[in-house]
């Protein structure tokens, strides 16, 4: 679906351009065309390929979606893919923004995401001195908008992790739920990391040294995006390490609890073994067992069993097993 198709000249909007006339406006000096699509069908993609003379491999990636974040060069043009990550309920949903950028055009193709970039276009149009830098600034503005939306997600992950940490040493029946929440949080952090790390490598190729001609005047801006991604990656690594530590602590607490239960069971088993031993000895009923005919034999046996069991109970209690 076509969102908008606008021609700009010297940083100022000229007019909304019919799609079939795009190639004509591309021939105009100091003019570039900015087109935005959302979930386009095959025919729309094919039309854009004809109007902009796009490389077939880049078109294939944009049409199929679900690509890894990357930056590829096709002659004087570049093709950038970024992941749009957003919260939907308790889950992270991943969409895709594919951007074709040439010397006099920008084509963005958004898939599987309700987030729009109308604010990016409005911001660019309010800054004609920036928009005058052409496709390089528009590419930066789109990528920067996506990266800025990563920060609230990282904040959410850190807040949720702090909440789980507060309950790690809580009631024992919540430990299983804590482990499940930690693993769910780890999956979310991994989803965002898969969006950040490849994109950070791609942005590193757009500043310093040899860069595509499209972004030659906007290298400083892409360095800023790279710095933002670097900060996000560092925070995600910290979240991941803290999650791993929290999982280990929780599992260790479960193991300690199981060990305490085993100690208690072993202690009571030892105490009841005394009953069994004495009962087995005095229950043999041999003819020449003098205590069997002793008047105080039965009370003596009970007192002996109680005394030994009491002694064992006291020793186990003192050792912390009971």
Image: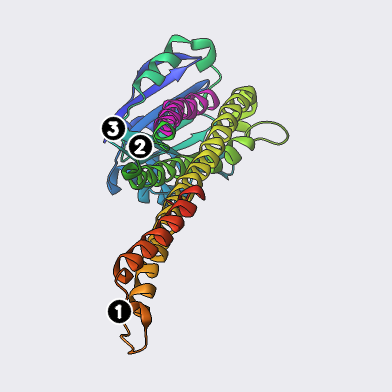
Choose the circle earlier in sequence order: 3 or 1: 3
Q: Is residue 282 left or right of residue 154?
A: left
Which residue is found at the position 46% from the left and 47% from the top? 253
Instruction: Give percent across and percent down for residue 138.
Output: 48, 24
Which residue is found at the position 58% from the left and 34% from the top? 234
57 or 249: which is nearer to us?
Answer: 249
- Residue at mark 3 to residue at mark 1: CA–CA distance: 93 Å
In front: label 2 or label 3: 3
The residue under label 2 is 110
Q: Is residue 2 left or right of residue 160?
A: left
The residue under label 1 is 293
Which residue is found at the position 52% from the left and 50% from the top? 319
The image quadrant that residue 110 belongs to is top left
The residue under label 3 is 114
**Residues in magenta, as a range:** 136-163
Instruction: Give percent across and percent down for residue 304.
Output: 39, 64
């Amino acid at each position: 679906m076509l969102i908008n198709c606008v021609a700009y000249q010297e940083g100022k909007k000229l007019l909304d351009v019919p799609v079939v006339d795009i190639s004509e406006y591309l021939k105009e000096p100091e003019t570039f065309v900015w087109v935005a699509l959302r979930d386009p069908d095959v025919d729309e993609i094919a039309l854009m390929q004809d109007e902009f003379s796009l490389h077939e491999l880049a078109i294939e990636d944009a049409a199929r979606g679900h690509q890894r974040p990357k930056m590829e060069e096709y002659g004087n043009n570049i093709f950038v893919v970024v992941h749009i990550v957003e919260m939907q309920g308790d889950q992270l949903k991943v969409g895709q923004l594919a951007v074709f950028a040439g010397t006099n055009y920008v084509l963005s193709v958004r898939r599987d995401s309700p987030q729009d970039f109308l604010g990016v276009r409005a911001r660019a149009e309010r800054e004609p001195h920036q928009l005058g830098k052409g496709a390089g600034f528009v590419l930066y503005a789109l990528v920067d908008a996506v990266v800025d939306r990563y920060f609230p997600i990282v904040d959410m992950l850190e807040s949720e992790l702090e909440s789980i940490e507060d309950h790690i040493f809580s009631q024992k029946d919540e430990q299983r739920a804590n482990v499940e929440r930690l693993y769910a949080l780890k999956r979310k952090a991994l989803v965002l990391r898969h969006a950040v790390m490849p994109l950070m490598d791609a942005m590193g190729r757009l500043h310093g040294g040899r860069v595509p001609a499209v972004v030659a005047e906007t290298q400083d801006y892409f360095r800023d995006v790279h710095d933002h991604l670097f900060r996000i990656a560092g925070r995600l690594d910290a979240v991941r390490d803290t999650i791993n530590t929290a999982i280990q602590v929780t599992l260790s607490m479960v193991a300690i609890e199981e060990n305490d239960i085993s100690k208690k069971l072993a202690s009571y088993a030892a105490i009841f073994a005394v009953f069994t031993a004495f009962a087995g000895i005095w229950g043999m009923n041999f003819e020449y067992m003098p205590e069997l005919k002793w008047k105080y034999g039965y009370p003596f046996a009970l007192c002996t069993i109680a005394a030994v069991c009491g002694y064992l109970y006291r020793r186990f209690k003192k050792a912390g097993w009971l």
